[in-house]
Amino acid sequence: MVANNRGSVWSLVTKVVEHSNFPVEQRNDARQQLTTDWVQWNRANEDHQYRGRYEISVQSQSYKQVLMVRLLELQQEGKAVTVPVQIQRYTAQMINAISAGLDKIDVASENAAMEVTDRATACRTA
């Protein structure tokens, strides 16, 4: 679940998707849902890279915003991957990427707020 005091969770999630250069196949802002095209995962520890298509959405549940990530398809070398551990791994990979992006936005927002406060304090003491 995502607690958010700084605007729409959906707008932040879509900003992270855009800044991460994840290709979007379909986006529905009214439903707060998008489907990616193939996202290439480049991991140095794997000889043959994986790629996945995802459904990402934000839903309201009990006055909270819930980020939902569902792996629609996973492939390696053009072949479908159905091994549960790999499906979990690459679902978690996307969740972690979005979470890291949300953290960056949150830190940047906090830093900007601190700068404004510091400037206001400096103006009052000058």
Image (cartoon, helix red, strand yellow):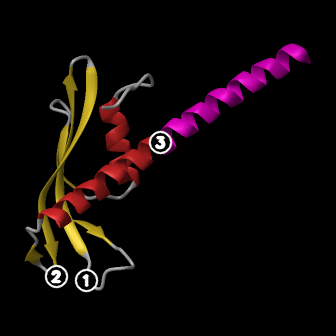
- Are the residues tagged 3 and 2 within 8 Å (C-beta)? no
The reply to whether the C-beta atoms of the residues labelled 1 and 2 are less than 8 Å apart is yes
The residue under label 3 is: 103
Where residue 77 is drawn, which disc sits there?
Answer: 2
For residue 93, above or below residue 58: below
Q: Could you say which is closer to the camera, residue 10 or residue 87?
A: 87
- Dot 2 amino acid type: Glu
Mark 3 secondary-structure assignment: helix
Residue 106 colored magenta? yes
Displayed quadrant of residue 67? top left
Tell me which residue sits at (37%, 43%) in the image: 15
Taking the view exactly as shown, the residue that stands out farthest to the front is 85
User: Which residue was labeled with disc 1?
Assistant: 48
The image shows residue 18 at horizontal and vertical percentages of: 35, 51
Label 3 or label 2, whichever comes before in sequence order: 2
Report crowding for label 2: few under 14, some 14 to 19, many 20 or more residues within 10 A (C-alpha).
Answer: few
Secondary structure at badge 1 equals loop
In terms of image quadrants, where is residue 122? top right
Which secondary structure type mostly characterizes the magenta part of the structure?
Answer: helix
Residue at x 55% of width, y 38% of height = 107
Vertical relation: 96 (above or below) 80: above
The boundaries of the magenta stretch are 103-126
Where residue 53 appears, as percent x and y from the top left, is 16, 60
| Residue ranking furthest to the right | 126
Which amino acid type is marked by label 1? His
Residue 57 counted in the magenta span: no
